């Protein structure tokens, strides 16, 4: 049950990151889940585990990490489309 909650929280974090930046994450729901989970890992590695936690993720660093990930990913995809 905790794995399902982990996926749900990852999806919400990925969705919020795309919503804050105004850019869609490629892959829909699966892309949001992956962006949220990888963003949580990235944010935890850069900023540590502070703030409220849910399903083993520190929410604030996870959201910041997901925003960074979505920004970099959208920049790379936009550059690849122009080429």
Image (tube, helix red, strand yellow):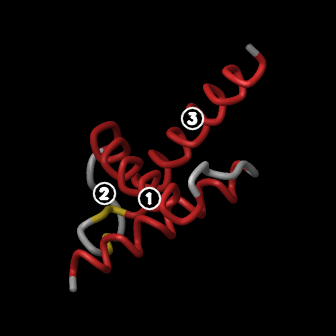
Residue 27: give its label.
none
Point out residue 26 in the picture as x, y percentages from the top left corner.
Answer: 60, 49
Q: Image point 57% across, 35% down: which residue? A: 73
Whether residues under marks 2 and 1 lie with C-beta atoms below 8 angstroms apart, the answer is yes
Foreground: 63 or 48? Answer: 63
Q: Which residue is mark 3?
A: 73
Q: Is residue 6 above or below residue 28?
A: below
Q: Residue at x 75, y 51 (%)?
A: 22
Mark toward the viewer: 1 or 3: 3
Q: Which residue is mark 2?
A: 50
Classify 10 Å Cα crowding around label 1: few (below 14), some (14-19), many (20 and above).
many
Image quarter of the C terminus? top right
Instruction: Determine which residue is flagged by label 1.
Output: 60
Locate residue 47, reporting x and y percent: 34, 42
Count residues near mark 2 (Cα–Cα under 10 Å), then give few for <14, some for 14-19, many for 20+. Answer: few
- How far apart, in angstroms, are the residues tagged by discs 2 and 1? 8 Å
Give the quarter of the image for residue 53.
Answer: bottom left
Contact (CB < 8 A) between labels 1 and 3? no
Residue 14 at x, y percent in the picture? 52, 59
Q: Residues within 10 Å of mark 3 (few under 14, many from 20)?
A: some
In percent of the image, x 32 and y 74: which residue is there?
A: 54
Q: Is residue 10 above or below residue 44?
A: below
Asked which secondary structure carries label 1, the reply is helix
Q: CA distance from mark 3 to mark 2?
A: 25 Å
Nearer to us of marks 3 and 2 is 3
In screen coordinates, is 41 left or right of 26?
A: left
């Amino acid at each position: 049950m905790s794995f399902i909650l982990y996926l749900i929280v990852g999806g919400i974090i990925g969705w919020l990151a795309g919503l804050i930046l105004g850019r869609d994450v490629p892959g829909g729901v699966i892309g949001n889940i992956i962006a949220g989970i990888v963003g949580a890992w990235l944010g935890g590695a850069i900023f540590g585990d502070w703030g409220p936690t849910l399903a083993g993720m520190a929410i604030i660093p996870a959201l910041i990490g997901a925003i960074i990930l979505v920004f970099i990913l959208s920049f790379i995809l936009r550059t690849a489309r122009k080429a």
